[in-house]
Image (tube, rainbow, N blue to C red):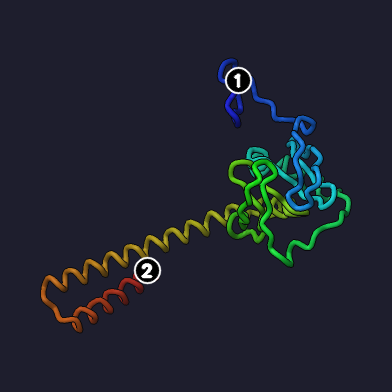
Amino acid sequence: MMFKGSRHCPHCGAAATTASASQLSTLKCPRCKAEMSPISIGGEAMRECEHCSGLWLEVAAFERICSNREEQSAVLGGASMAPQAQTHSITETVRYVPCPQCGQLMNRINFARCSGVVVDVCKGHGTWFDRDELREIVEFIRGGGLELSREKQKRELEFERSQLRMEQTIAASRAHSQALGYSDEERVTGISATNTLLKFLLE
């Protein structure tokens, strides 16, 4: 017995084995409603819809692909050799699709918030990739996209903190002015001057 997601047995220390493609239970494509076929790319078991070429990856499998360059290469190689298939016009109308495992509608998320690849995610079970989306995400990662995303989020957080400090300073200045009995016009003038100074210092 092992906890789901464990890399090693807690008793003997043996490495855990991932499920092979043949061991995956059959699930239906969230778009076509057809049964998906179990396949394996780069050692990762996943499910593929033969009608629309969509892929269903469970949470752990996708995380391993994101962090393993060998598996990323396998994904790119497999994608380049994938046969052409009839695809749905999913870009014309946005349609939320259900998770193949729990049936709940999945969230549509821009991967890494800046990749431009919008995928359907069930946090508890996995991610649905329409045709070519997994390949596009792997190319984004290998091009340094995740590092750029982290830097962008860091800058946004620093800006939010600066804004919060500015608001706290203005509030403290307003309270101090009121305690000293300054008029409304004097308080507004003082706050404006403080605001201008803080913006100058933060630029």
Residue depicted at x 81% and y 50%: 53
How many callouts does the rendering have?
2
The numbered mark, 2 or 1, whose residue comes first in the sequence reads 1
Residue depicted at x 74% and y 53%: 130
Given residues 64 and 108, the one toward you in this image is 108
| Amino acid type, residue under disc 1 in the picture | Met
Q: Residues within 10 Å of mark 1 (few under 14, many from 20)?
A: few
Disc marking residue 51: none
Q: Cβ–Cβ below 8 Å for labels 2 and 1?
A: no
Could you tell me residue 176's position as x and y percent? 16, 69
Q: As drawn, is 199 to the left or to the right of 179?
A: right
Which corner quadrant holds the N terminus?
Answer: top right
Tell me if residue 74 can be seen. no
Q: As drawn, is 32 to the left or to the right of 84?
A: left
Task: State the image quarter where residue 16 is shown.
Answer: top right
Q: Work out whether 12 lies above or below 34.
A: above
Q: Residues within 10 Å of mark 2 (few under 14, many from 20)?
A: few
Q: Which residue is mark 1?
A: 1
Tell me if residue 113 can be seen. yes
Q: Work out whether 95 lies above or below 103.
A: below
Which corner quadrant holds the C terminus?
Answer: bottom left
Given residues 200 and 66, the one toward you in this image is 66
Q: As drawn, is 21 to the left or to the right of 201?
A: right
Q: Residue furthest bottom?
A: 185
Q: Which type of secondary structure does the marked residue at label 2 adopt?
A: helix
| Amino acid type, residue under disc 2 in the picture | Leu
Q: As drawn, is 149 to the left or to the right of 48?
A: left
Task: State the image quarter where residue 169 is shown.
Answer: bottom left
Q: Which residue is mark 2?
A: 202
